[in-house]
Amino acid sequence: MAPLILYERSAIIRAESSEPLMPHTPDERDPRVAAAIDRYWKKNVTIMAVLLVIWAAVGLGAGVLFADTLNAYHLGGYPLGFWFAQQGSIITFVVLILVYAILLNRLDKEHHRDLAAGDGGAA
Amino acid sequence: MSVQVWTFLFVGVTFTLYLAIAWFSRVSDTKGFYVAGQGIPAIANGMATAADWMSAASFIGMAGLISTLGYAGGMYLMGWTGGYVLLALLLAPYLRKFGHYTVPDFIGDRYRSNAARIVAVACAVFISFTYVAGQMRGVGIVFSRFLEVDVNIGVYVGVAIVFVYATLGGMKGITWTQVAQYWVLITAFLTPAIAISLQLTGTAIPQIGLGSELLGEGTMLLEKLNQIQADLGFSSYTEPFIGSWNKLNVFCVTLALMAGTAGLPHVIVRFYTVKNVAAARWSAFWALLFISFLYLTAPAIGAFARYAMLDGLNGKTEQELPGWFHSWEQTGLMLWMDDGDGRLSYTGGDRADENELFRSGKLGSAEIATIKTDHQKWLSGREGGRDGRAVLRQAGLAGPDRDIIVLATPEMANLANWIIALVAAGGLAAALSTASGLLLVISSSVAHDLYYRIINPAATEAQRLLVGRGVIGVAVVIAGILGIYPPGFVSQVVAFAFGLAAASFFPAIVLGIFSKRVGTYPAMFGMIAGIGFTATYILGSVYGGWSSWAFGIGPQGIGVVGMAINFAVTLGLTPFYPAPYKSVQELILSIREPEGAPPALDIDSGA
C-alpha cells in the first residue's frame, strides 16, 4: 500500500494551530460515497452493540449479578453460576471476537463492492 | 538428574533461544523498533499478544488466587479476558487504521494538543512502571524458588536478558521472542494440569475434570471440595459473594479489570504491529484464543491443588506427609507449627485458631528460626516459649503462600523432575515477555512522543533510534530497582495498574473514536480527574490506612469509579468547549471508514 505524507510535520507540533490536518479527498465529498460510508458505520455500530450486550449479559450478568441464582442449577459437577464465572464467560468472549472478526471483515468487503458498483469509487 | 540441573538446563536453553531470536530480528529503523515494521502476521501477533499479556501474575499468582478465593477468583478470569472483547470491538481496529506508533500519539493527534499528549505519556509511563515492577520481582521469585539463589540475583539476570533483547530488536525482537515465550509458558502450564486432572478425575481435559467425579469417591470434585472446606471452617468454594467479596465489589473489580485490560498501553500497541485492519481483528481473536488456553486451565489447577492440599495434608504425621510438602516447606512458602499432637491441621474461618499451616512471608530466616525455637520451648512448657501459631497468625501469615499452587502442582501430580523445571522456564517466559512489552511502551512514549514529537522534531532517524534504545536501557534498570525494592504484593500491584488504565486511557480513546464532538480540554481534564482520583484512593487505602469510604468498594475495583468520573467530567465539560477542528473530525471519519484507502496518517514511511 502506498504510504502518503498527508500533512506537514509542523502541524501537530504547533498543537493548537488551525491548519487542516488532512486535505479533502474527492470521494469523501461525493454524496453517494458518503452515504455508503454512513451505512457501513451504522451496520458496524449495530453489530458492535449486539455483541456488547451479549458480552455484558454473559460476563457481568450470568458471571456476577445472577451467579448466586444460577448456582442452584448444575452443569455436570459445576454449579452453573460458578461455571459461568470461571469457564463459560471466557468461552463466550472468544466466540464473540471470532464472530466480530468474521462479520466486520465481510462488511468491509461488502462496502468495497458497494462502492465499486457505484462508480469504481475508493477501493 | 535433579530438578536444579534440569532448571539450569531449561533456563539456559530458553534464554539462548530468546537472545538468538533477538539477534536475527534486530532492527535499524524506528518503524521496526516501535511497531515491528507493521508486518507481523495476525496469528503470530496473537501469540505475542498472549505472551505479552500473561504476566508472572497470570502464570504463578492467578491459580493460587483462585484456589484461595474460590468463586471470587472468577473476577480475575472474566476481567482479564472480557477486556479483550472491549479491545477488539471498540479500540483495536480503529487504532490500527489510525496507523501510528503509540497510545499517546493517538491521544495527541485526536485531541490536537501537546498537553494532552504529555498527560498520556505520563499515564503510560506510570502504568507501565507499576506493572513492570511486578514482573521483575516475578523473575527474581522464580529464580529463588527453583535455583535457590537470592531473589535479587534473579532480578539482575532478568534485567540483563531483557536489556539485550529489547534494545537490540525493539518491537520486532520482542514480538518474535514473545511468540517463543508463549509456547514455553503454555506447555509449562498445561502439562501439570493435565497430569493432575488424570490423577484426580481420570480425564485428561482439566476443564472437564473440574466438573467430574473424583476417582474412587463417587462424588463430584467441586461438591467434595465444598464439603471439606466447610468441615475445616473455610467458606464454600463455589458459592458467590462471601465476606468482603460482595456482589458490588466483585462487579467493580471485574469491570475495572475489563476496562483496564482494554486501556493498557502495552496491549493496545500490539495491534499497531499487524499489516492492516482485518489482520488487527483476527489478531484480537487469536490473542484471546491463546490466552483462553491458560485462563480456562487456571481454575482447574486452583481447585485440584486446593483439594490436594486440604485432603492430602490434613491429619497427616511427619512421615505420612507427601514428599512435595517437605521440599516446599524448605522454601518458607509453607511452615508447619504443630500444636503437639504430631498431626498437621490446616483450617480457617471459625476454626482459624486450630490452624497449623503458615507461610514465612516477608520474615527473614533468622526471625523464622527464632519463632520456631520459641515455639518448641512453648510446646515443651519451658520458659521463654511463645506459641508460634499465635505469632504468625498475628502477622497475617496463616495458610501457605498462594504461589505454591502453581509451583508445587507438578510434584503433587508426581511428575518427573524435568517438568518441574519446565514450570520454572514457563514462569520466567511469562515474566520476561510482559516486562519487555511494557518497557517498549515506556521507551516509545518517552523517545517517540516526548523527545521526537515535542522536544526535537528535527531529530534524524538514527538519533531517534538511539534515544529509543537509551530509554529502554534506563527503563530496564529502573524496573530492576523496583523489582528489588517492590512497592507491594506482585498481583496486587498489577491489579492497581488496571484501575489506573481504566480511569485514564479507556474513556479518552473510546470517546476519541466514537464522538466527533469531544474536544481537547474536556478529555484532558477527564483523564487527570480519573487517574488522580483512582491513584489517590489506592495510595490512601493501601498505604494511608483509609477505610473504604466509597460505598465499600476496595482499591482494586475503584478504577470503575475513576472511569465513571473520567466519562462524566469529559462529557460534562464538552458542551462548554468548542468542537474539534474540522481536520480532526475528518481524521475521526477516516479511522472509522473501512480500509481500502491508505491509512489515515502515516508520517514516517514517506521519508
Image (cartoon, coloured by chain):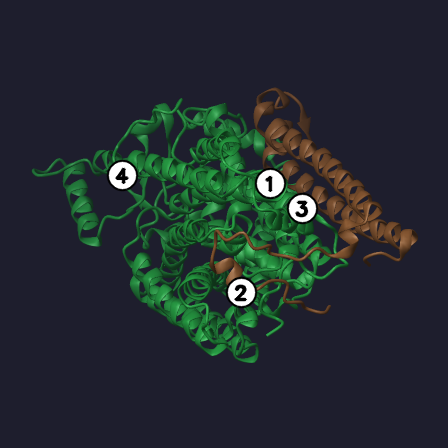
Chain colours: A brown, B green
Looking at the image, is mark 1 or mark 3 nearer the viewer? 1
**From the viewer's perspective, is residue A22 above or below residue B228?**
below
Tell me, yes or no, if residue A81 can be seen here: no
Q: Mark 4 points at which residue?
A: B543
Q: Say what secondary structure mark 4 lies in.
A: loop
Residues marked 1 and 4 touching at CB (< 8 Å): no
Q: Say what secondary structure mark 2 lies in.
A: helix
Disc 2 residue type? Arg
Mark on residue B203? 3
Q: Name the residue under label 2.
A: A9
Disc 4 residue type? Tyr
Horizontal side of residue B426 vs B131, given as left or right: right
- What subunit carries mark 1? B
Q: How crowded is mark 2: few (under 14 residues within 10 Å), some or many (20 or more)?
A: some
Q: Say what secondary structure mark 3 lies in.
A: loop
Q: Mark 1 points at which residue?
A: B82
Q: How far apart are marks 1 and 3 (CA)?
A: 28 Å
